[in-house]
Image (cartoon, rainbow, N blue to C red):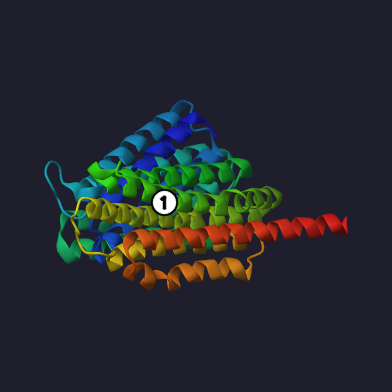
């Protein structure tokens, strides 16, 4: 992987932070659903460029020029994200997002078709995928020109066509051929770690002008503990074993692991990080308001904020379970219980004071890390005794 591709990934993660801005400081079910739809579309675009980078070098010649155009389109889409559903000042936000997304996809498909000349059958797959994708661009562009329910329905249709068409393409034509397993695993791990790092910026946003107040600093550190646990649960054991499994697989099985465990499952991981960050931002905003003597929206989190906090963590944990499953790693009952508990504790997170709600979730994640560590130590000990 090259520094140029890291640059591309940073722009993508910036778009994720703009989706957080769309969801807003007072998230509602509507804004959370709107953010999810845009996040999925962005992920489909980013994932496509990752497959392209796996096929050819991204930092040379015509491909680099195409990536720069794609980065410009991604930046425009990111800037317009908060106005993606309702036009604001300046240029039309929904139309900017739609046009930028279409440009992203067109550049990717043109470049991929160009570099696939030497791979038998790959150009035919790309043309089929392009035809399906183009069918989804029509409702996307038409929806951007309308408003209200028509806008939302057409964009949902575009999402279904784009995502469903990708799965149909995989099922009928097969997954894209994977040239470098190490590149693919490293690229997905990097974008996840950047997303986890950017999620910490929620502490500054939520704390606002009271960010240096002792209660806010304390809760920011609790948020860091929770984020570090999410990092541990993926990067310490799951990711290295998965990378070895991907490298050791061959042929269609390797292509399928790459498509399922990385292209698809990492969407759940990144989405979980985004919503968890929104939840942490809400907690810190409540703590900052309480410190200032302003009770804000009330003494506890709203249902939407609690769903973002606990649901985001649960989605991340569920994504990790699928990641383990698709890469042939054991899925233990304790790992399943951890994800289920994050969901079951959601009503408690809604009822407790926000600071306590975040503390309970952090404690749950710490317990999950300790349990995971204990199981690994025991397995290592058993293996050493058998030798």
Whether residue 136 appears in this view of the structure is no
**Residue 256 at x, y percent in the picture:** 59, 57
Q: Nearer the viewer, residue 374 or 114?
A: 374
**Residue 190 at x, y percent in the picture:** 51, 42
Image-quadrant location for residue 117: top right
Q: How many marks?
A: 1
Q: Nearer the viewer, residue 92 or 219?
A: 219
In the picture as drawn, the residue positioned furthest to the left comes out as: 89
Q: Quadrant of the C terminus?
A: bottom right
Image-quadrant location for residue 381: bottom right
Whether residue 233 appears in this view of the structure is yes
Q: Quadrant of the N terminus?
A: top right
In the picture as drawn, the residue positioned furthest to the top comes out as: 61
**Residue 361 at x, y percent in the picture:** 44, 61
**Residue 141 at x, y percent in the picture:** 24, 53
> Circle 1 sits on which residue?
223
> Is residue 365 left or right of 257 when viewed as pictured?
left
Who's the residue at 27% across and 39% down the image?
76
Q: Secondary structure at mark 1?
A: helix
> Is residue 303 left or right of 377 when viewed as pictured?
left
Who's the residue at 81% across and 57% down the image?
383
Crowding at label 1, few (<14), some or many (≥20) Cα neighbours within 10 Å? many
Q: Height in image: 304 above or below 251?
A: below
Q: Nearer the viewer, residue 235 or 62?
A: 235
Who's the residue at 28% across and 47% down the image?
207
Who's the residue at 49% across and 70% down the image?
341
In the picture as drawn, the residue positioned furthest to the right comes out as: 387
């Amino acid at each position: 992987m090259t520094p140029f591709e890291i640059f591309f990934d940073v722009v993508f993660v910036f778009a994720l932070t703009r989706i957080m801005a769309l969801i807003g400081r007072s998230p509602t079910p509507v804004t959370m659903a709107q953010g999810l739809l845009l996040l999925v579309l962005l992920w489909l675009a980013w994932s496509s460029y990752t497959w392209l980078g796996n096929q050819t070098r991204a930092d040379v010649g015509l491909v680099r020029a195409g990536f720069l155009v794609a980065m410009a389109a991604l930046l425009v889409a990111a800037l317009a994200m908060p106005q993606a559903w309702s036009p604001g000042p300046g240029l039309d936000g929904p139309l900017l997002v739609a046009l930028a997304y279409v440009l992203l996809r067109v550049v990717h498909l043109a470049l991929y078709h160009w570099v696939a000349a030497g791979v038998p059958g790959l150009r035919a797959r790309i043309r089929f995928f392009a035809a399906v994708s183009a069918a989804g661009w029509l409702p996307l562009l038409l929806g951007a020109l309308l408003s209200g329910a028509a806008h939302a329905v057409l964009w949902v249709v575009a999402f279904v066509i784009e995502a469903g068409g990708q799965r149909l393409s995989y099922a009928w034509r097969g997954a894209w051929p994977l040239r470098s397993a190490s590149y693919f695993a490293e690229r997905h791990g990097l974008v996840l770690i950047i997303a986890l790092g950017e999620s910490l910026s929620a502490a500054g946003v939520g704390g606002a002008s009271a960010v240096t107040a002792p209660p806010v600093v304390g809760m920011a550190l609790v948020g860091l503990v929770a984020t570090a646990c999410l990092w541990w649960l993926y990067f310490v054991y799951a990711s290295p074993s998965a990378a070895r499994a991907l490298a050791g697989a061959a042929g269609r099985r390797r292509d399928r692991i790459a498509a399922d465990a990385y292209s698809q499952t990492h969407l759940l991981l990144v989405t979980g990080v985004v919503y968890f960050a929104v939840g942490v931002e809400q907690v810190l905003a409540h703590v900052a308001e309480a410190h200032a003597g302003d009770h804000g929206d009330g003494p506890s989190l709203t249902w939407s904020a609690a769903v973002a906090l606990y649901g985001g963590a649960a989605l991340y944990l569920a994504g990790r379970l699928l990641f383990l499953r698709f890469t042939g790693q054991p899925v233990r009952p304790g790992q399943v219980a951890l994800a289920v508990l994050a969901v079951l504790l959601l009503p408690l997170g809604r009822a407790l004071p926000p600071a306590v709600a975040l503390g309970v979730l952090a404690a749950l994640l710490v317990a999950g890390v300790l349990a995971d560590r204990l199981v690994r130590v025991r397995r290592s000990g058993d293996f050493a005794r058998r030798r």
